[in-house]
Image (cartoon, helix red, strand yellow):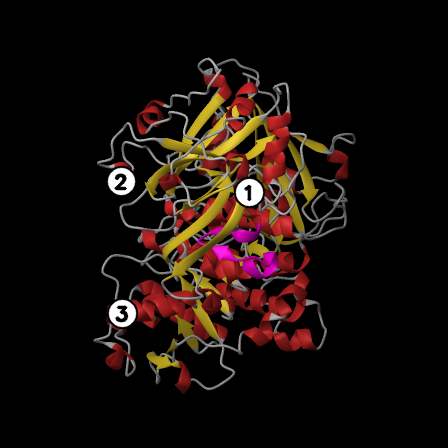
Amino acid sequence: MSEQAMKSVSPGIVAQNYEEATFCTQCFKLLRANEQDFDSASMRYQFPIDVDSESFSARVKSGCRLCILLDKWLEPEPEGTLIPPCICRVRNATATSDSTTKQSGNYILEFDIKSSNYKNCSTGLRLTSHHETPITPQQQQNKTPKLGNVPPTSSLAASSTASPSCFDLIEWWINDCNLNHKLCSFRRDLSTSWLPTRLIFLGDGVNEFPILCSREYIPPGKRYNTLSHRWGPNIFRLLSSNLGSLQESLPLDQLPATYLDAMEVSRKMGIEYLWIDSLCIIQDSGQDWRLESAAMGLVYKYAWCCVAATACQQAGMLINRPPIASRCTIKPSNDNPRIAAGTYNLFPLEKGTWSNGISNSPLSKRGWVTQERLLSSRIIHFGERQMFWECQERQACETFANTIHSREINNYKLNYPASISWPHMLRELAPSSYYTYWRDIIRDYNVCQLTMPSDRLDAIAGVAKDIRTALDSRYLAGIWEKYICADLLWSNLSWDRVAYNRNLGTRNREYQAPSWSWASFNGAPWWLFDLRPHNYVVEYVRGDVVEIQAGSLGQVKSGFIHLRGLLINHGLTIQNLIYKKPPRLPSCTEIEYYNYEINLDANPEEDPRLQGIDRSSAVYTLPIMVEGLRGETDSCLLGSLAAENLKFIRSSTNGHSLLTMHALLLLRTGNGEFQRLGLLSLKDKYVYACLKLESVLKSNEYIERHNDYLYTICIV
């Protein structure tokens, strides 16, 4: 900063270098205000601003950081309008009360702005204590001082993520996680106990250069990092033809900048090996891909750290950027200041830091990333504006280096749980919580993009393996056998009848999964019910799937389930489904539109399975569950009490006005064989009319016939 510029800085604000923020006289008074300047009741400071005044415009043009921030929120008012004062509240970001006297640390300046049309808006500015140097692991081992309380903040002024200050913060996050986090501690041994089939040996980048190594040539006890990224067009890949040459050297001039940056970040961490999917899996070998994709979950689970190119594709992670903050040093004062003397980083307090930087990032829209984030022990994200951190105990970023304020990530944790809670939850939650957690994952996972639809089950198989252990259940192409009656009641619409990704499901011509699985259609499934006991009127008999790679829990060749229940053919046809006309029931007038609902998995006119099939072909109904029934509830979710519940309904003399039945809509494709088309819901008296039907079927419509007009059928 020039000598002239230093003279323009307000008294009491010390300018040290080009990063230093400047303030106008009015804003300086706010920063140096003492306790007596604040209203004793509201603890707020009257901060008059006239946005139309020449003086305010001049302060913005002169570079007053606080005025520039407020100018973004204020709009010009009609001439002659009385401008209400801008109210400012100064609070300590880490304290439980408003009192900040004699405290140094983190402050938030909250501005409430009221315009003449009585619309309120608010914005904020944060002052964070500046720490130049991170605590080293050796200092932590000597127990002085405590590492977890003082993350370095100098990266906030860095104009590049390649800055040493950015690597200082990464080093602090890793050291604190490794030394102080109880939930992360078990990963220390994991990270040296298993290795992928192939890894990239990084070398030092000067005398040693990267090569591809097979596991048998890697010394035991070595750690490795992973790269999480989006593939770009014409990306360099490992092929059968270049495997030998890559084991001698990697062509660095042909690799994307993101790969080179991941190598450099890993070297800075002291990690010698790196796993990148396109370079460690033979891309033109189906056999190698199936073997390696089956182990993908282990690759991320056993890695030391996942380096994520969260904001970019192939442009690189170590890039130039505008500094996040300016430096602000407030000199000591004897007049009991509201903000204690100290050196601070000054930056806007943005809402949605985590959701904007992570959840809505380009990388998070990639389907495989769901599993990569859940299973990685720790992740360093290179975002568009700053770096982010995730581990079992911390979610943080440069502006909130210790932890991101909980209010900003509540929705994120609810809708898309990350690795911060994964192993901890598997140890302590009840089975119903695992199941709910799984459903949340699958719902959000299916909104993401997959280049190959056939990867639908492969890209989440690692998570399924962990959940399988927690639920103690067989896994049938995305459905849990132990809870199958509840699992079959998925829909492509949410409870408020809106598609989660605002697009009804579609089906591909290529086989993806059995029709009864959510993996068979392209869309985000919603489940109608949780694991609480319900009145099921169908019984699960048996089922199985044939996986392409046995034991992978990934892509399947085929699958079936046998269900025993009341199979009904009541005149419903494919043509009815197209126009969503209700079924016809004996002794009932036409069902009113508000007493039934047809929810199809895909548009029947676009469903490839229905191409060339007569539109008058019968659509069958298989009731699964009844709400509001006073019969026996089935807590095992296998439908073992289905026959008893049906007897209870059929023995009732009067219809019940509070019942709702949920049933599968099925198309017959062979002798006793069916495929799922969607769901049917009936209400009130029509439930009794439907379930009391004595449906007589032909021998080619079922596998086995039982008493009380119950049938066993196969759904594929």
Determine which residue is flagged by label 2: 608
User: Mark 1 to mark 3: distance in Å?
Assistant: 39 Å
Specify the segment rendered in magenta: 468-482
Location of residue 632 in the rendering, given as x and y in whole percent from the top left corner = 67, 37
Q: Residue shown at 62%/58% (left/top)?
A: 426
Q: Residue shown at 61%/54% (left/top)?
A: 403
Q: Which of marks 2 and 3 is nearer the N terminus?
A: 3
Determine which residue is flagged by label 3: 285
Location of residue 584 in the rendering, given as x and y in whole percent from the top left corner = 42, 20
Q: Nearer the viewer, residue 524 or 81?
A: 524
Location of residue 162 in the rendering, given as x and y in whole percent from the top left corner = 42, 64
Q: What label sits on residue 486 in the rendered view?
A: 1
The verdict on residue 476 being magenta is yes
Q: Which of 649 and 25 is in front in this view?
A: 649
Instruction: Give the number of the mark in front: 1 or 3.
Output: 1
Q: Which of marks 2 and 1 is nearer the N terminus?
A: 1
Query: What amino acid is labelled 2 in the image?
Result: Pro
Q: Residue shown at 27%/71% (left/top)?
A: 238
Q: In this view, does 253 lie to the left or right of 678?
A: left
User: Mark 2 to mark 3: distance in Å?
Assistant: 29 Å
Q: Which of 139 and 334 is in front in this view?
A: 139
- Element assignment for label 1: helix
